[in-house]
Image (cartoon, grey):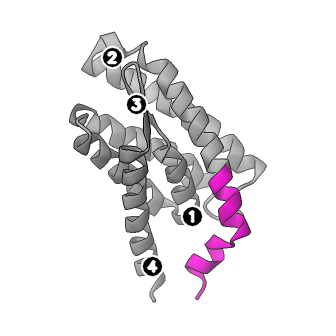
Amino acid sequence: MNKKLRKAITSGVFCAMIFVLTMFVKFPVASGYVHFGDALIYVCASLLGPWGIIAGAIGEGLADVAGGFAVYFPATVIVKALIALPFSLFNFKNEKLLSVKSGLLTIPSGLITVAGYFIADMIIDKAYALVDIPGNLIQAAGSAVIFIIISAAFDKANIRNKLFRG
């Protein structure tokens, strides 16, 4: 199978998994919910580079629309593309998904989540701007932990080579 086609198909599968993990595996907080779809965005961007950016933005954007948060769709698409960017730039070519560097990449991505949604809340409804910060911090920390767990499992199973060899 053509490598571009394989990446496009894998991106679509990740987009669907990100949607499901965001839409259905969530925990309510004061102003919305915390989910771990970001962890899969980190994995996807590490495996697929730019395709991972697209999958993450679309998957989580659609989850916002389907979940009744359509007003956040534009912000989510931008924020999720930005959180995938460090992994796409600095972890995409690595042999392993999990390394000290990739673990540290969760920090700027988590900060992008918190800052991005703070800015979005300042535009959409200022009353939620400060209320959202704790939930976004929990989401960022939880996503980092889940990313580490998934990446370790994917590395042990040699997923990168299995997906893209030949």
Instruction: Decide which of tag 1 and tag 3 comes sooner along the chain.
Output: 3
The answer to if 151 sits in the magenta stretch is yes
Say which residue label 1 marks: 47
Q: Earlier in the sequence, mark 3 or mark 2?
A: 3
Disc 4/disc 1 C-alpha distance (Å): 12 Å
3 or 4: mark nearer the eye: 3
Task: Indicate left or right for 148 with 77 as reference.
Answer: right
Q: Which residue is mark 2?
A: 122
Residue found at x 46% / y 46%: 37
Q: Residue at x 39, y 74 (%)?
A: 9
SS for callout 1: helix
* Res 93 → quadrant: bottom right
Our reading of the magenta stretch's main secondary structure is helix
Q: Residue at x 69, y 71 (%)?
A: 157
Cβ atoms at labels 3 and 4 below 8 Å apart: no
- Residue 144 x/y as whole percent: 62, 41
| Amino acid beneath label 1 | Leu
Q: Which mark is residue 33?
A: 3
Residue toward you, 39 or 94: 39
Q: Helix, strand or loop at disc 3?
A: strand
CA distance separating discs 3 and 2? 18 Å
Q: Which residue is mark 4?
A: 6
* Viewer-proximal residue among 102 and 159: 159
Do labels 4 and 2 touch, CB within 8 Å? no
Q: Could you classify mark 4 by the number of other residues whose Cα lies within 10 Å: few (under 14), some (14-19), or many (20 or more)?
A: few
Q: Which residues are magenta?
A: 149-166
Which numbered disc, 1 or 3, marks the residue closer to the eye?
3
Q: Label 3: few (<14), some or many (≥20) within 10 Å?
A: some
Q: Looking at the rendering, in which quadrant would you find the C terminus?
A: bottom right
Tell me: residue 92, above or below residue 77: below
Magenta residue check for 59: no
